[in-house]
Image: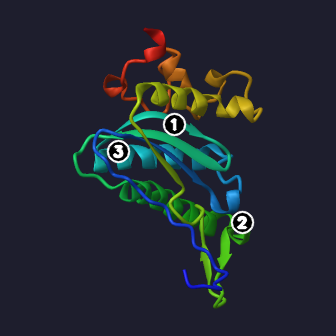
Amino acid sequence: MQPGCMHYRKSCHRDNRPGDAHALTFSCFRRRPFLTRDRSRMWVIQAIALAKAKHDFDVWAYVLMPEHVHLLIYPTRDHYDISGILQSIKLSVSTRAIRYVKEKSPEFLSRMADVQPNGNVAHRFWQRGGGYDRNLQSPKYIWETIDYLHANPVRRGLCTGNVDWKWSSAREYAGMGDTLLPIDADSLPDDPRKS
């Protein structure tokens, strides 16, 4: 950055390292609660399933909150691109959401409007940028992350117990098996806290 420059641009460094899990968090545009309806939540679930098939990753945990998504994945290819995985998920949801709003609820478009400095308007479902990505290697941190993600809806007061939140993998971890997106438990490391 040049001296005296007052404009800062955040950059997100991705470390696509084989053998690492990735704890991803990505938010709706301006952290607006675009994920309060079952319809938009299902779009996210379906987009993750499609991206999983396309990019070959295992899903270890997920939680959909009203304005953001937490996703813990384990890429199974030696060469992978987390940015490409996120783009597959986010583009699919954005395309469906914007098309739906234009056809069924055009008055909602103003909440998705991102006015550019040149006056052009883009409609966004997701916040610009890559979100948050943290590489995880240690089984201890992987399991702590899973617990943290599953507790998110409880901390926010959306439910009383983590298994009460339908939009999470917590029910599968509790042995209820009726989650919307199956977990790839076979590739999970053993929980060292249970040794």
**Residue drawn at (61%, 75%) of the image:** 8
Q: Are marks 1 and 3 in contact (CB under 8 Å)?
A: no
Q: Nearer the viewer, residue 123 or 26?
A: 26
Q: Nearer the viewer, residue 98 or 194?
A: 194
Q: CA distance from mark 2 to mark 1?
A: 27 Å
**Residue drawn at (30%, 49%) of the image:** 55
**Residue drawn at (66%, 54%) of the image:** 34
Q: Is residue 100 above or below residue 132?
A: below
Q: Which mark is residue 108?
A: 2
Residue lying furthest right in this view? 157
Residue 44's spot in the image, x, y percent? 51, 48
Q: Residues within 10 Å of mark 3 (few under 14, many from 20)?
A: some
Residue lying furthest bottom in this view? 118
Residue 30's spot in the image, x, y percent? 69, 62
Question: Label 2 sits on what residue type?
Answer: Phe
**Residue designated by label 3:** 52
Q: Nearer the viewer, residue 85 or 9?
A: 9
Q: Is residue 164 above or below residue 110?
A: above
Q: CA distance from mark 1 to mark 3?
A: 13 Å
Lower sequence index among marks 2 and 3: 3
What secondary structure is marked by label 1?
A: strand
Q: Is residue 162 above or below residue 34?
A: above
Q: Is residue 52 visible?
A: yes
Residue 109's spot in the image, x, y percent? 68, 70
Question: Label 3 sits on what residue type?
Answer: Lys
Lower sequence index among marks 1 and 3: 3
Quadrant assignment for the C terminus: top left
Q: Residues within 10 Å of mark 1 (few under 14, many from 20)?
A: many
Q: Is residue 169 visible?
A: no
Lower sequence index among marks 2 and 1: 1
**Residue designated by label 1:** 62
